[in-house]
């Protein structure tokens, strides 16, 4: 049954673009930086080409270089520079680098990203309070890059923004707030990951409220971006109703053709059931969410995996005491050696069904987002008897956007 609709606006826009300073991102999605060597130039450029922000993960990126064990600092810097330059050749879109504050070469990696004029840097796993000389010498206004801290609470956002305001007379350009359902390291205590978890919607609303003070004070828009457990267009639409101007998605982009991890890593996602996604203790000192395998079972039982530490890559890692090397385990997994590693994954990673091009994933997200948005509109229009499951887009949407899939 075709439903007569109140308006058929030819210029109807599915999603509003995300604005970060003078950068406009058509698709308000930041692809989560995924290490070690999971989101490199391949995935980042594909997401940027699809209109979002494609993000290269900087952590231990030098593991892709032959001399990492001897020359780790140089290998990391070289590896990051190479991937940024490679990605730039593949896209004119918006590119970012994800840098963990918890790594010992945080400032060096950040400087490489700034020298390469990356569009945005996302700084997580710690409070990004220090800025490298590259910025302090020039001043923020002379630097192309936009700064986006990743936090797990409005309180953490306030600490960072207040510190930056006082120290640099400048505040970050956007903020990512990531909830407890994310993949990778989580900014929550293990005991806060049970049934009493704070919902992402609450974290987003609290952060929007906190940040509005700095928006007024510094007379600039500071978008709040939500992350963690966002997988579908419906998830995206719903969280944006709580004030998020964009979303950060990691797991959803793992099972793409362009994701830089090995096929075995991607297949782990496709094979995983909901029960396989578990919490682990990481040597970073934070809990993490990952897909259960033999390696995860062993470490959760307290068994150790002997390793050699060429350098202390994480500030908080006591390499003499930790049961395994997380950087090595993640790199092994990304390279397809899942006997000696494991895959980080968000709470919804089990929804992966197949390996698809990024373009197709983005198309699905857009359709789903539009469907949810339209269903809500119809519900308001014709009442609550409306059932989203029966919604056939081609019948009810007068001007359905024609997005071609290559
Ligand atoms: C496989 C994987 C690796 C990740 N690696 C990193 C990382 O190296 N640094 C980081 O700050 N976040 C990392 N993350 C977190 C992502 O950037 C992103 O915030 C997260 O995936 C969002 O949750 P979602 O997976 O539910 O979408 C990782 C996540 C995944 C799934």
Image (spheres, helix red, strand yellow):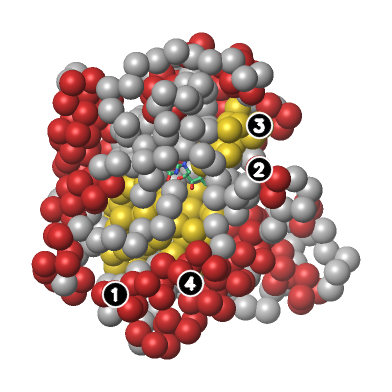
Q: In terms of sequence position, does the residue under pointer 4 or pointer 2 come before the other? A: 4
Asked whether the residues under the numbered discs 3 and 1 touch, taking CB atoms below 8 Å apart as contact, a structural biologist would say: no
Q: Nearer the viewer, residue 196 or 175?
A: 196
The crowding category of the residue bearing disc 3, from other C-alpha atoms within 10 Å (few below 14, some 14 to 19, many at least 20), is many
Q: Nearer the viewer, residue 297 or 397?
A: 297
Q: Which residue is mark 4?
A: 158
Q: In terms of sequence position, does the residue under pointer 1 or pointer 4 come before the other? A: 4
Q: Which residue is mark 2?
A: 190
Instruction: Name the spot of residue 228 as percent of width and height, x first.
Output: 57, 50
The crowding category of the residue bearing disc 1, from other C-alpha atoms within 10 Å (few below 14, some 14 to 19, many at least 20), is few
* Distance Cα–Cα, label 3 vs label 1: 41 Å
Residue 167 is labelled as 1
* Distance Cα–Cα, label 1 vs label 4: 14 Å
Instruction: Name the spot of residue 276 as percent of width and height, x first.
Output: 68, 26
379 w.r.t. 321: above or below: below
* Distance Cα–Cα, label 4 vs label 3: 32 Å
Quadrant of the rendered image containing residue 148: bottom left
Foreground label between 1 and 4: 1
* Distance Cα–Cα, label 4 vs label 2: 23 Å
Q: Which residue is mark 3?
A: 277
Q: In terms of sequence position, does the residue under pointer 4 or pointer 3 come before the other? A: 4
188 w.r.t. 64: above or below: below
């Amino acid at each position: 049954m075709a439903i007569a609709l109140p308006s058929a606006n030819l210029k109807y826009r599915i999603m509003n673009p995300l604005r970060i300073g003078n950068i406009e991102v058509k698709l308000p999605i930041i692809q989560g930086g995924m290490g070690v060597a999971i989101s490199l130039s391949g995935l980042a450029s594909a997401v940027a080409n699809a209109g979002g922000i494609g993000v290269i993960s900087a952590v231990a990126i030098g593991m892709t270089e032959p001399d990492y064990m001897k020359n780790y600092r140089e290998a990391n810097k070289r590896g990051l520079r190479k991937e940024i330059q490679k990605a730039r050749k593949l896209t004119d879109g918006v590119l970012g680098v994800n840098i963990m504050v918890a790594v010992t070469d945080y400032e060096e990696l950040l400087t490489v990203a700034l020298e390469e004029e990356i569009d945005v840097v996302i700084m997580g796993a710690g409070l990004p309070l220090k800025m490298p000389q590259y910025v302090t010498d020039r001043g923020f206004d002379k630097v192309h890059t936009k700064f986006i801290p990743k936090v797990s609470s409005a309180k953490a956002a306030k600490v960072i923004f207040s510190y930056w305001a006082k120290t640099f007379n400048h505040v970050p350009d956007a903020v990512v707030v990531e909830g407890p359902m994310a993949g990778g390291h989580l900014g929550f205590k293990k005991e806060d990951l049970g049934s009493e978890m704070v919902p992402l919607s609450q974290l987003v609303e609290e952060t929007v409220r906190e940040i509005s003070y700095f928006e007024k004070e510094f007379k600039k828009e500071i978008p709040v971006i939500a992350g963690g457990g966002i997988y579908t267009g419906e998830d995206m639409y719903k969280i944006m109703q709580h004030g998020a101007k964009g979303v950060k998605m990691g797991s959803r982009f793992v099972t793409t053709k362009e994701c830089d991890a090995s096929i075995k890593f991607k297949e782990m996602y496709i094979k995983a059931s909901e029960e396989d996604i578990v919490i682990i203790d990481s040597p970073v000192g934070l809990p993490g969410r990952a897909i259960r395998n033999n390696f995860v079972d062993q470490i959760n039982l307290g068994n150790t995996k002997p390793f050699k530490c060429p350098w202390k890559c994480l500030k908080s890692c006591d390499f003499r005491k930790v049961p395994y090397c997380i950087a090595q385990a993640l790199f092994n997994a990304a390279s397809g050696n899942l006997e000696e590693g494991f895959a980080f994954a968000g709470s919804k990673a089990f929804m992966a069904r197949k390996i698809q091009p990024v373009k197709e994933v983005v198309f699905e997200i857009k359709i789903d987002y539009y469907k949810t948005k339209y269903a809500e509109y119809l519900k308001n229009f014709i009442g609550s008897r409306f059932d989203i499951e029966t919604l056939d887009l081609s019948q009810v949407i007068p001007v359905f956007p024609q997005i071609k899939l290559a």
